[in-house]
Image (spheres, rainbow, N blue to C red):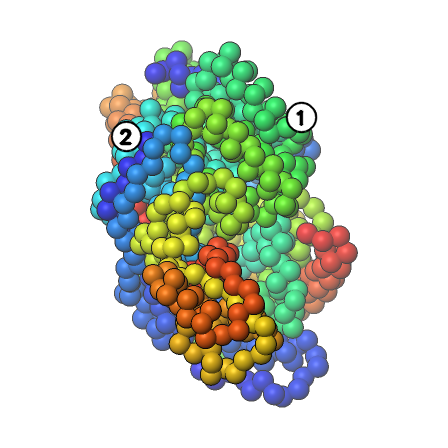
Amino acid sequence: MIEVDALVKHYTVHRRPPGLWPALRSVLRRPTETVEAVAGISFSIAPGERVGFLGPNGAGKTTTLKVLSGLLHPTSGRAQVAGMTPWRREPAFLRQITLVMGQKQQLLWDLPPSETFELNRALYEIPRAQYAETLSELTRLLDLGRIAAVPTRQLSLGERMKCELCAALLHRPAVLFLDEPTIGLDVSMQAALRAFVRAYNERFGATVLLTSHYMDDVIALCPRVIVIDHGRLIHDGKLADLVHTLRPEKRVAVRLSRPVDGRDLEGFGRVAERAEDRVVFQIPQAEVKDRVGRLFAQLPVADLTIEDPPLEEIMRDIFAAGRVA
Amino acid sequence: MATAPAEIPSRTALGRAVRALPTLLRVGVAEAVAYRAEFVIWLLTTTMPLVMLALWSEVAREGGPIGGYTGKDFTAYFLAAFIVRQLTGVWVAWDMNREIREGLISMRLLRPVHPLAAYGAENLAVLPMRLLLSLPIALVALALTGGAAVTRDPLLLLAFAVAVAGAWLLGFAIMSAIGALAFFIESTLAVADVWFGLFFILSGYFVPIELFPAAVRNVAVLLPFRAMLGLPVELLIGRLGHGAALHGLLIEWAWVAAAWAIAVAVFQAGARRYSAYGA
Amino acid sequence: MARRYFRLLSAQLRIAGLASLQYRADFYADGAMSIFWLAVNVAPLLVVYQRRPTLAHWTLPEALLVIGWFTLLKGVLDGAVNPCLTAIVEHIRKGTLDFVLLKPADAQFLVSTAKILPWRGVDVLGGGLVLVFALTRLHRLPTPLQIGASLLLFAAAVGLLYSLWILAISVAFWVVKLDNLAFLFSSIFDAARWPIGVFRGLWRFLFTFVVPLAILTTYPAMALLGTLTFRTGAWALAGAAFFALLARWVWTIALLHYTSASS
């Protein structure tokens, strides 16, 4: 459904050091510099898949989504969505997709959402019967009730987001691009939206590509995740595998029957945590079997567990690294 | 450019504003440069006096002087008007309106510099850039139209400087008062529109005030509009005697005082209301 | 295709009308403003004619015909053109233009029909009254042909205004901080209140060919007076058509720039 091949997107940005003199000089010539927002990524998504798109701020997530929805021309590379090239923006393509942005809204501010729905019906030329059917189904799934008849400016953020989704899905797109759809919402509203996206995906077999800052969104919705950082793809696969790709280490937690000297703990792996009678080692996957044997032999082990590092911790590391760079 | 040392304690808002001024000015210039295209557009919107110049010189050429203005006088008048507009034009009403509407004004209210002082510095900061771009235009126009009379009287030139300063202060205070109305009402920009309509007619922007019928002229001289444009222009091209100049300046500065009192009052009341109800 | 866009147009206009109904109080304010601006428009003219019987061979009632068309056009400008201009600048600033571009319909069509202020129709009425008043003062009843020609030229003027507006919009893709774009537009347009004959040399050239204000108001007025030659009228129509094509071309380029450079 979505095929991306060696996609590259560069921006030219103006750079100017602070100060009066550089400011005046830049009247005549602006120093520019090229930013590599997307530096050659490839992936492919099958119809009906739900894929999470992760990465720190500025990793290139939104840029990629905009290229895939036809809003941006890539610098090079190929992309096919629903069998068409997005940036040619053919009406047939636009009818197949939708883009929901958590931070921007398409609803008309002064009018009730139902008017935006009506307008979209005309824009997408949705036959009346199909429109009525989709609208009633979406109203049920989203639990819209009567809020569609209230002027948008009087709705809460969560209610507005529900109506945004409804407006974006009236034409029954086959591909959903969701950019931070749950941003700023409270926990129960986030859960409701997640449930809806999953229900829509299952009901209509639509393909979903979702970016989010909330790990919970991704864990709840996406069996598959794509992680990009600095415009490069660093993981593509199951959420569970993400842990192995990014941190090919196990956490080996040991409870000791008596305290030991710090020197005795050397040689098993990096000590991640240490308390009175508890030590956690980070041990490379391949070595785990061997090291655990030695642990039992050399230390007074009362209890031992082997586990994957928590996902949040990994993501936090990635996101923090991105912010520094 | 040196910034005033920060450690001098000064408890008055004015003192703080004055000390922050050099930095604010520098930031303002940098911003004006960064948005150079906007600047050119702004410059184009202010070329109206040049259109009026073409129009009135043609009228004078066609049928002789009007009300004592020859073609050359019109040229001098509208070129001076162009320069004075460059020096005194402010847009604070729009900025303030938008920032109040979008809640950005909170940032300004949190800073230790009074928002009006900060807006003032931003508006002053673009002046060097404006003059840099508009003086050549005026000089070229001057050369094309065959020169024009500027007064040689040092007293009038001094009065001109005082009048321009007054015109800026007056315009800024009124635009601030209109902008601060956004704390209270929806359609501040409509108010600004009405103000501009009156300004265009009564300031001498379209027609020198002297050409109006006596009844209109006598009222117009007392209103703030003429002080913002017509007065400095007439001083620069030497159309006023010393007595009339002094009279005009007195009226102008009386309006300056009144307008500032109003602007500060409206802004303070608005800011209080804003902090009470939130954005 | 045409039927589809007609349906879209009515959908867009319905929404725009509904939105403007939200601000009913504006109706009275706009009505008052309209009379006020008419006075502002006529004032400089009265100052001239107080001292001169003619200006560039135009008598006062003849010049009033120009003012009449000017007021009519201003109604169209303020009622249908400027609101869209402000709306799209807002779209670009907030990034919501993306939603417009995602719709399976022509983006230029969508942005230029998104907003209207029907209240400004008051200006159109006022302009019509000025035209009737000027014609009575001239003791002149234009022939149907002259009325037809002036209406045709007025239609061309609206088209031209729209094209100039699209050109201005296209600038907004490069320059984002554009609160004063509408202001620039109306301040250039302001010069159209004068018969083009009063301008000479550089200005005449500028206002005839670069920013063709002559076509906007002077030619329709001349058509009513029966002084417009067929040749000039034809050139005016061709000029309007040229600007329409130019505007479409620049718009396409601007959109391409937007989709290849923005973030």
Q: Nearer the viewer, residue A283 or A115?
A: A283
Name the residue that disc number 2 marks.
A84
Q: Nearer the viewer, residue A153 or A185?
A: A185
Residue drawn at x 52%, y 83% is A261
3D distance between C-alphas at marks 2 and 1: 37 Å
Report whether residue A15 is seen.
yes
Residue drawn at x 48%, y 55% is A311
Mark 2 and mark 1 in contact? Answer it, CB < 8 Å. Answer: no
Query: Measured from the top left, where is residue A309 in percent x and y?
Result: 47, 59
Quadrant of the image for the N terminus of chain B?
A: bottom left
Q: Are marks 2 and 1 on the same chain?
A: yes
**How many dots with numbers?**
2
Sequence-wise first label, 2 or 1: 2
Tag shown at residue B239: none
Q: Residues within 10 Å of mark 1 (few under 14, many from 20)?
A: few
Where residue A11 sits, quadrant-wise, is bottom left
Q: Residues within 10 Å of mark 2 (few under 14, many from 20)?
A: some
SS for callout 2: loop
- What residue type is disc 1 on? Gly
Residue drawn at x 53%, y 70% is A301
Query: Measured from the top left, where is residue B29 in percent x and y?
Result: 44, 69
Q: Is residue A270 above or below residue B50?
A: below
Where residue A89 sits, quadrant-wise, is top left
Report whether residue B122 is seen.
no
Q: Nearer the viewer, residue A292 or A206?
A: A292
Query: Measured from the top left, where is residue C92 in percent x and y?
Result: 44, 44
- What residue type is disc 2 on? Met
Name the residue that disc number 1 marks.
A145
Query: Measured from the top left, where is residue A238 in percent x and y?
Result: 40, 45
Q: On what subunit does the disc labeled 1 rest?
A: A
